Image (cartoon, rainbow, N blue to C red):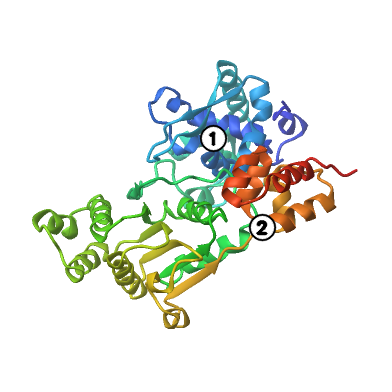
Amino acid sequence: MDSIGSNQEKGRGVKLRLTINEKILLHLLENHRAQGEREAPLSITQRGIADSVGIRWNHVPRAVNKLKKLDYVYERLSHIEGKTRRQKAYFLTDDGLLTARTLRERIMNRDVYLVKSDGQRVKMRLGKVNSALKSQFPPMKLIASISDDGEIRVDELLEGPSEVPTTPAPRVFHVSGEIAWPEELVGRESEVKKLTEWLSGTTYGTAVIYGSIGIGKSALSAHIVQAFKDRKHVMWYQMSDGDTQSDILEQIAEFLSKLGDSKLSGFLRDHEKATLTQALKLIEDDVSGKSILLAFDNYYQPGEDVVDLLSGLSIMASKSNTLKLLINAMDTTPFYCRFYDKGDVKKKKIAELSLKGLDMESCKVVLEAPRIEHDALRKIHLMTRGHPLSLLLIKRGDVNSLKAIKGFTRQEASLLLYLKGVEGE
């Protein structure tokens, strides 16, 4: 691993520059106490590491690959605080712990200039800055604050978040059914941007994603939920055949009760049957002033009572600046099952997004075939229309599922697998 001490030997007043791997070692050292915990913190998952060192979360496995080969870091599937599914978490080995501590000690012995509010410039070891300021900033924070001139400006340092920040109120994340987090969302940048704008803005109260089976509606919604669940209280409801209005209301009540005293929860407990008007009024009282996202997956042919409930919730969201709805629906959902009309779209109460197949470059990424011959890729794209599930089945070599799920003949499925293996020069 490259030495980080070279800047100091060559001269003072040069900004300290660390490699991505050195930053990861320091970050994992700061979180080393989590090693023996039953639940790992989000900070040592791919997303937590990415946020700390400034890379994309899906690039973390590649970034730590060298550290794993050096036996400095190991990964394991762990229960994560506040998560329903296990995720990969990263930990320091004994050699990694020793290397990280040595790295931190070398950095903290570096000379910097502490520039005070009155302009006084004091030379000191980086490790003495916290003592001088009576603060407890972590090493990564101090390192990031060093200017190109080797200075730490006290005013700028203290303006940022302190080492002991005020802990924000925890966000509630309630899941009914299953939610599958996509490892990587390919080729949906424009869709993510649109949904983020709709759900962050004050016009559209509801966003509806339409598409065929396997087109990626659930993956896209899960990606959006992942982005919003640290900003909003989120309920994810996976719909299934036979769901009733009462089933959904019970889950909404359970979710709202986690936010505090729920009028809806108490009412449903004390009354065997509630009218929809009563339930909606109580939900409106419960969500008032709270930033909430209700996400419904697999909306297709619900009963009339469920359609009425979604209609009432969407009207409520259109009048609120804090309540948002996100709904995944089949593009073949009958008109009489749609809980709104085109007038709601024109009035910007409802946003519609029709999800199409992926472009050719995205197909190549999903197939994990970077050297595939262009004409072979074009044929696959034409035959599958960029359908993500079809591409995943091709990648896995699953002929039977291509036949059963997507209706390809055995000859067509075999051809798709053959084309995937055709490499260009």
Q: Position of residue 282 (x, y in %)?
A: 19, 65
Residue at screen point 44% across, 45% down: 162
Disc 1 residue type (three-letter): Pro
User: Of helix, strand and loop, which one carries label 2?
Assistant: loop
At label 2, the amino acid type is: Leu
Label annotation for residue 26? none
Name the image quarter holding the N terminus: top right
Q: Residue furthest right?
A: 425
Task: Answer few, some or many: residues within 10 Å of disc 1's Cα (few below 14, many 20 plus, some between 14 and 19).
Answer: some
The residue that disc 2 covers is: 358
Which residue is at a point 43% across and 39% down the rendered structure image?
Answer: 135
Query: Would you say 108 lies left or right of 425 here?
Result: left
> Which residue sits at x=48%, y=72%?
351
Q: Is residue 391 visible?
A: yes
Q: Can you tell which of label 2 and label 1 is closer to the viewer?
A: 2
Residue 19 pos. (x, y %): 69, 35
Q: Secondary structure at mark 1?
A: helix
Foreground of the two, 317 or 416? 416
Precedes in sequence: disc 2 or disc 1: 1
What residue does disc 1 label?
139
Q: In the image, residue 347 lies at what x, y percent?
A: 44, 82
> Is residue 208 rendered to the left or right of residue 287?
right
| Spot occupied by residue 10 in the image (x, y as percentages of width and height) | 77, 32
